C-alpha cells in the first residue's frame, strides 16, 4: 500500500471511530436513563407521597429528556474539546502533557542532535519541519500530534533524549513521522476530542455525589440521599464511557503501531535503530511511562505504552507488547532485556552527541531513479535514499546559513534574502520596500546574510525554506502579520510575481498561516476527477511549459491522457497564470486521496517524461505536491 492507500485507510479508520463513538453514546444514554429511574425510585423512599413505581420503568417522555440531557453533555463536551484542539493544534496536546518547546537555536548537544534528526526526517519526507517539544519525563517516549502538517509537532521525553543514541532516536522519530504521513496524527486528534465527551458522565456523577442542599431554614443538610444515589449510579455508568474510550483507542491504534514500526524501518533502512530503542525501553526501570495527569487522555499518541509498565502484556492496552513489536522487526529476538543504567548511558550519549556536532555527515548519496513510478513511490513513503539525500543537502548547507535558519529573527532575514532579485535595480527597489516594512534589526540581518544566500546552490533553496519553519513558528501573531506583510510587499515591488516567489510564498506563508490560524484539516469535496479536470489542466500546462518548450503541447496531451482526458485543450498562457494555478491547487487539495494520486501521477509524468528534472521543475513539482498535502521528498535533478 502506498501513501494514498494509507490516507484512505486512515479515513476508513475515522469512520470506524465514529461508529464506535455512536455505539458508546447509545449504551451510555440507555444506562443514564436507568440510573435516573433508580435514583427516582430510591429518593421517593424519603418523601411521604408515592410517585414513580416499578410498573413505570419505561417512561418515553423521561427517556426523551434523558437522551437530550446525555447527548448535550457528550456531544457538547466532544465539540468543545475538538474546537480547543483545532485552535491549538498539536502544540495544545504537547503543552497539555507539560511539554516545553525546544528553541530552534538550542546549542545543547543532545537537544541539537534531536533537532537535527527531526529536520533531516522532515526534509527527507517532504514535510514541513515541525516544532519539537520536550517533556521533562524520565521515561522513554515520543509522540506526533496535529491535524495537518502545518500544525503538527513532535514531542519527545527527556528520557528518550538522554538515553537513546542517534540511530535509536532516528528510529523513534521515523516512527512518529510515519504516523504523520499515514494520517494517524489527525485521526488521533479527532479521537481525543470525541472520547473526551463520553467520559464527562462520570465527572457529572462525582459532582452530584458531592453536591450539598439546604433545609427550608437555610441550614446545610449535606448531600441528598437521592442525589448521592443518582450521582453514584451516573459515576458507575460513566465507567462505561471510560471503558469504551479505552476500547476505541485499542481498536483504532494497536495495528497502526505495527504499521508505523514497519514504515520506520523502510524509512531508515536500519531495523536495529527502532528495535534497539524498544530494547532500551524494556531494560530501563521507568520504561516508557509518562507520569502526568493528562497521560491517560493522550495514551494513544505515544510511541510506547505511557500508562502501564512495559512488561504488562495486556490485550486491552493501546500498544502491542514490546517483545512482539521487536520480533516483527528482529525475528531472532529471545525476549531478554539488558538492564539500563541511566547515568552511564546518559553520559555516553552526551559525549557522542558533542562529537557528532564536530563532524559533517557523509557525502555519499544514492541517485534516485527519475521514472514517474519511482517518484510516485516515494510520496509519503520515503526510503533510505531520501534520507541520504536529505543528509547530503544538510551537509552542503553553509553552517552560517543553517545558524540563520534556527533563530526567529534571522530566519525571517533568510526568507527576505531568498526573495531578493539577482538584478541590482530590482533588488534595490525590494530593499527600499523591505526597509519600510520589516523590523529594523531583521532588515540589518537581511543585508548581512544576502551575499551568502546569493551564492547558495539552487537545489538548496527549498530545503532552506523548510528549515526556517520551526523558528518562524516561534514568532508572535503580531510578528507573523508583519512578516507576511513584508513578504507580500517584496514580491509586489517589481509588479511581477516570479515562479520561485510564488512557490516560496505558498510553501512558507501557507504553512505558517495554517500554524497560526489552526484551521484544521481540509474536508474532502471531490471523489471523482471529472469536476477537477479544468483545474488539473491548468496545473499540467504550467508544468509542461516550464520544462519542455516546443514539446509542451505534446507532453500536456500525454499527461492529460493519464487522466483519461487526452482531448482537453491546452490552456492559453493567459488562462494558466499563477493566480489560476493557485486556485487550481486550492480545489485539488479538496479531492479524495485516490483523485490526488491520479493528478499527481499526471504531473510527475509531465515533469520526468524526458528522464531529467531541472531545479525549476523540481521546485514546481514539490510545490504542487505540497499544495495537495502530499509530501514529496527532495528530487535528484540534472
Image (cartoon, helix red, strand yellow):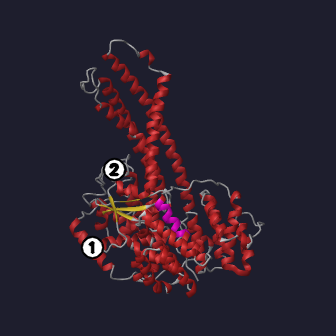
Which one is closest to the eye, mark 1 or mark 2? 2
Badge 1 crowding class, 10 Å Cα cut-off, few under 14, some 14 to 19, many 20 or more, is many
Residue under label 1, please give it.
350
Who's the residue at 55% across and 85% down the image? 422
x, y percentage for residue 346?
25, 69
Residue 304 seen in the current view: no
Magenta region, residue range: 506-516
Residue 339 is a magenta residue = no
Residue 583 seen in the current view: yes
Q: Quadrant of residue 203?
A: top left
Q: How many marks?
A: 2
x, y percentage for residue 380?
53, 65
Q: Quadrant of residue 74?
A: top left
Query: Is 496 located above or below residue 329 in the figure?
Result: below
Quadrant placement of the N terminus? bottom right
> Label 2's element?
loop
Check residue 294 in the rendering and tell me which mark sits there, or answer none: 2
Q: Residue furthest front?
A: 436
Query: Is 35 located above or below residue 475 in the figure?
Result: above
Who's the residue at 23% across and 65% down the image? 342
Amino acid at each position: 500500500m502506498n501513501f494514498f492507500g494509507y490516507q484512505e485507510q486512515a479515513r476508513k479508520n475515522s469512520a470506524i471511530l465514529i461508529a464506535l463513538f455512536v455505539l458508546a453514546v447509545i449504551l451510555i444514554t440507555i444506562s443514564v436513563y436507568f440510573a435516573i429511574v433508580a435514583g427516582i425510585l430510591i429518593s421517593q423512599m424519603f418523601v411521604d407521597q408515592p410517585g414513580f413505581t416499578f410498573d413505570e420503568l419505561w417512561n418515553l417522555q423521561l427517556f426523551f429528556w434523558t437522551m437530550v440531557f446525555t447527548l448535550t453533555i457528550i456531544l457538547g463536551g466532544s465539540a468543545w474539546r475538538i474546537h480547543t484542539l483545532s485552535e491549538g493544534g498539536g502544540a495544545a496536546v504537547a503543552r497539555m502533557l507539560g511539554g516545553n518547546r525546544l528553541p530552534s537555536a538550542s546549542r545543547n548537544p543532545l537537544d541539537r542532535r534531536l533537532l537535527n534528526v527531526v529536520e533531516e526526517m522532515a526534509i527527507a519526507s517532504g514535510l514541513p519541519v515541525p516544532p519539537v517539544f520536550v517533556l521533562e519525563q524520565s521515561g522513554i517516549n515520543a509522540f506526533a500530534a496535529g491535524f495537518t502538517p502545518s500544525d503538527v509537532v513532535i514531542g519527545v521525553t527527556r528520557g528518550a533524549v538522554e538515553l537513546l543514541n542517534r540511530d535509536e532516536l532516528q528510529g523513534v522519530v521515523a516512527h512518529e513521522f510515519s504516523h504523520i504521513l499515514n494520517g494517524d496524527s489527525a485521526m488521533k486528534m479527532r479521537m481525543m476530542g470525541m472520547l473526551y465527551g463520553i467520559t464527562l458522565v462520570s465527572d457529572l456523577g462525582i459532582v452530584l455525589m458531592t453536591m450539598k442542599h439546604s433545609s427550608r431554614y437555610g441550614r446545610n443538610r449535606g448531600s441528598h440521599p437521592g442525589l448521592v444515589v443518582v450521582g453514584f449510579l451516573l459515576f458507575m455508568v460513566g465507567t462505561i464511557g471510560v471503558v469504551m474510550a479505552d476500547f476505541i483507542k485499542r481498536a483504532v491504534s494497536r495495528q497502526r503501531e505495527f504499521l508505523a514500526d514497519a514504515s520506520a524501518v523502510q524509512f531508515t533502512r536500519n531495523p536495529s535503530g527502532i528495535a534497539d530503542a524498544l530494547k532500551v525501553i524494556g531494560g530501563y526501570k521507568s520504561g516508557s511511562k509518562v507520569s502526568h495527569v493528562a497521560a491517560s487522555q493522550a495514551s494513544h499518541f505515544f510511541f510506547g505504552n505511557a500508562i502501564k509498565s512495559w512488561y504488562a502484556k495486556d490485550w486491552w492496552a493501546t500498544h502491542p507488547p514490546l517483545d512482539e513489536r521487536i520480533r516483527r522487526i528482529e525475528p531472532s529476538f529471545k525476549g531478554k532485556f539488558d538492564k539500563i543504567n541511566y547515568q552511564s548511558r546518559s553520559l555516553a550519549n552526551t559525549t557522542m552527541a558533542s562529537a557528532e556536532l564536530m563532524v559533517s555527515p557523509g557525502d555519499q548519496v544514492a541517485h534516485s531513479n527519475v521514472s514517474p513510478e519511482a517518484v510516485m513511490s516515494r510520496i509519503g513513503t520515503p526510503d533510505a535514499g531520501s534520507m541520504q539525500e536529505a543528509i547530503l543537502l544538510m551537509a552542503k548547507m553553509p553552517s552560517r546559513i543553517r545558524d540563520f535558519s534556527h533563530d526567529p529573527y534571522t530566519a525571517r532575514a533568510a526568507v527576505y534574502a531568498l526573495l531578493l532579485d539577482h538584478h541590482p535595480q530590482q533588488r534595490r527597489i525590494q530593499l527600499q520596500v523591505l526597509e519600510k516594512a520589516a523590523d529594523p534589526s531583521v532588515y540589518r540581518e537581511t543585508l548581512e546574510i544576502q551575499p551568502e544566500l546569493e551564492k547558495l546552490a539552487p537545489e538548496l533553496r527549498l530545503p532552506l525554506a523548510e528549515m526556517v519553519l520551526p523558528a518562524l513558528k516561534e514568532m508572535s501573531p503580531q510578528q507573523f502579520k508583519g512578516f507576511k506583510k513584508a513578504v507580500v510587499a517584496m514580491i509586489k515591488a517589481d509588479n511581477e510575481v516570479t515562479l520561485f516567489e510564488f512557490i516560496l510564498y505558498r510553501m512558507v506563508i501557507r504553512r505558517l498561516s495554517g500554524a497560526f490560524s489552526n484551521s484544521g484539516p481540509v474536508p474532502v469535496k471531490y471523489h471523482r476527477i471529472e469536476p477537477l479536470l479544468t483545474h488539473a489542466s491548468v496545473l499540467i500546462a504550467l508544468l509542461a511549459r516550464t520544462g519542455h518548450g516546443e514539446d509542451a503541447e505534446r507532453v500536456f496531451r500525454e499527461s492529460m491522457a493519464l487522466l483519461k482526458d487526452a482531448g482537453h485543450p491546452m490552456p492559453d498562457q493567459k488562462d494558466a497564470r499563477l493566480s489560476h494555478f493557485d486556485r487550481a491547487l486550492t480545489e485539488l487539495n479538496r479531492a479524495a486521496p485516490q483523485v490526488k494520486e491520479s493528478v499527481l501521477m499526471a504531473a510527475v509524468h509531465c515533469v520526468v517524461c524526458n528522464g531529467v528534472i531541472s531545479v525549476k521543475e523540481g521546485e514546481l513539482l514539490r510545490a504542487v505536491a505540497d499544495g495537495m498535502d502530499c509530501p514529496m521528498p527532495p528530487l535528484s535533478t540534472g
